[in-house]
Image (tube, helix red, strand yellow):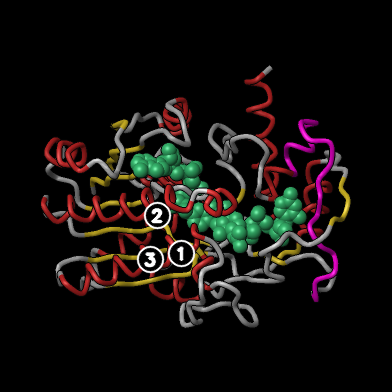
Amino acid sequence: MEILVTGGTGYIGSHTVVELLQAGHSVVIADNLCHSDRSVLDGIRAITGQIPVFYETDCCDRAALDRLFQRHPKLDAVIHFAALKAVNESELLPLAYYANNLGALVTLLQAMQAHRVNQIVFSSSCTVYGTPGNPPVTEQSPIQPATSPYGATKQMCERILQDAVHADPSLSATALRYFNPIGAHESGLIGEKPQGVPQNLLPYVTETAAGIRRELRIFGNDYPTPDGTCIRDFIHVSDLARAHVCALEHMRHVPAGWRTYNIGTGRGTSVRELVDTFIRTTGASVPFRYEARRPGDIGQIWADPSLAERELGWKSVKTLEETLLSAWRWQQHITNLEK
Ligand code: NAD
Ligand code: UD1
């Protein structure tokens, strides 16, 4: 198949491009490079031996998307990663988040309709479940009020897709609700590049181990969990990337329609467990101290991913140890590049 990947030079997008190329698909990337750079294409080439077609294109720019679809009249499907994703930033810049995340999806869907491309896989998030009840979370768990403008954009995008599918019976849309993607490609050649001080746990851990940060702050050890720290479902980004290939293949064999799947491991890991496992498997040192809870954090969440296994034939296979080692390999790669 020929697939348009928006946000394809970003963290999850680049790993998905690798999986798509290795599965024999052709890829066209559209990314405006607001949160990534072209050097990612070198990493993709080094891993796969192929260079995907790349357009520096904003998905809110309808004319640019029309040109892209005209140049690639055989596109079969779109995977839409392009979005702004920082929860804290979305509190400060809600309008930028609504304009970009909703604008890009609506513009893309209009362009797809005009050029008769009728399959889309959308990057959603477990954040749509808000503060859920007892884990694990299934796709039937209620959608709760969003806890940030970022989370609201994911809920609204899902609604936009549902409405679009309802109005156009030829359209197929699958939302993959990611839990906590971490790690990097096993080659250590592509990975996550946080801008400035990392907000997410594992990039902070690897930067502390690399000596870039002095110590990790663990936010809260008084949660009602076995060790008092929060529990999350951390999933290797390459496992997550593979879920997109499975979702596309599934779409070809089922009637058009709207579908959602949880993409997680089904295992909860506490923050403290993750830090201890990182130290044990890498041999690196990670000084840490406990701090007060981070506002907005939920105590525990993990996925029930059994629907994805049953319907998409997908499940995660990487262990936590290999996931953490991959993140460490990537951190060492970027630290060396910056020397
Ligand atoms: P990322 O920031 O690394 O990648 C997003 C890419 O989209 C970047 O390359 C950026 O330049 C591009 N982009 C943003 N707006 C664009 C626009 N208007 N037009 C063209 N390109 C644009 O983020 P990521 O972690 O790879 O996330 C990918 C998707 O997965 C996002 O939709 C995100 O909300 C979603 N998601 C991520 C996580 C996570 O923990 N990383 C969890 C759940 C969902
Ligand atoms: C957050 C977002 C989620 C988003 C994901 C990736 C919320 C509610 N969820 O998930 O929508 O998809 O980021 O961008 O905001 N922690 C520390 N020290 C740190 C950093 C984190 O102890 O320096 C802890 C946090 O308190 C949390 C856990 O590590 O308990 C995971 O945090 P993080 O990696 O930021 O992910 P989430 O908050 O789960």
Query: On the image, numbered disc 3 is attached to which residue?
Result: 156
Magenta stretch bounds: 205-224
**218 up-or-down from 140: above or below:** above
Residue at position x 22%, y 56% in the image: 109
Question: What amino acid is found at the position of numbered circle 2 in the picture?
Answer: Tyr
Residue 122 at x, y percent in the picture: 36, 58
Evaluate if marks 2 and 3 touch, with contact meaning CB atoms under 8 Å apart.
yes
Evaluate if marks 2 and 1 touch, with contact meaning CB atoms under 8 Å apart.
yes
Looking at the rendered structure, the secondary structure element under dot 3 is: helix
Evaluate if marks 1 and 3 touch, with contact meaning CB atoms under 8 Å apart.
yes
Quarter assignment of residue 34: top left
**181 up-or-down from 43: above or below:** below
Question: What amino acid is found at the position of numbered circle 1 in the picture?
Answer: Ala
Query: On the image, numbered disc 1 is attached to which residue?
Result: 152
Report whether residue 321 is seen. Answer: no
Residue at position x 38%, y 66% in the image: 156
